[in-house]
Image (cartoon, rainbow, N blue to C red):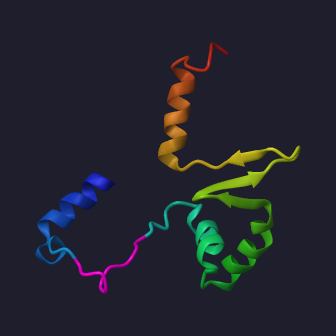
Amino acid sequence: MRKQAAEIQANCPKCAKIPSTEKSFTVSFAEDWRAPYLASFINGVLPTDPKHARKLKRTIKRYFINGSTLYRKGFNGEPLKYLGKSEAQQAMQEIHAGECGEH
């Protein structure tokens, strides 16, 4: 996805200019399911849809962040780190490659 974004930006004359500090802003991709939770913890922002906002308020009690990493409180008190799609694929490849032992 980064490669595609870089290609689009390189081909666009408006995007090729470096924006000034006043005109720059942060873009987050909503396809990551962790984005609403991180936005709520970091910025205090809730989704505009009342149904999603109510669900987030109800479930956010189970989560916490450390830095910019989202964790869930486990049943026995241990933190469970939530991975993005690419991180999960990398972890599965490492496990199947035998780096974590043969199981």
Q: Is residue 83 above or below residue 8?
A: above
10 vs 4, nearest the viewer: 10
| Residue found at x 80% / y 66% | 61
Which x, y percent locates residue 67?
A: 60, 58
| Residue found at x 51% / y 48% | 85
| 14 left or right, relative to 70 | left
Which quadrant holds residue 33?
bottom right
| Residue found at x 77% / y 67% | 59
Q: Is residue 69 above or below residue 36?
A: above
Q: In which quarter of the image is the N terminus?
A: bottom left
79 vs 49, nearest the viewer: 79
Which x, y percent locates residue 24?
A: 32, 79
| 39 left or right, relative to 103 | left
Which x, y percent locates residue 103?
A: 67, 15
7 vs 81, nearest the viewer: 81
| Residue found at x 54% / y 50% | 84
| 71 left or right, relative to 13 | right
Highlighted magenta segment, given as a residue range: 19-27
Q: In this view, does 7 lie above or below 103?
A: below
22 falls in the magenta region: yes
Q: In this view, does 9 lie above or below 4?
A: below
7 falls in the magenta region: no
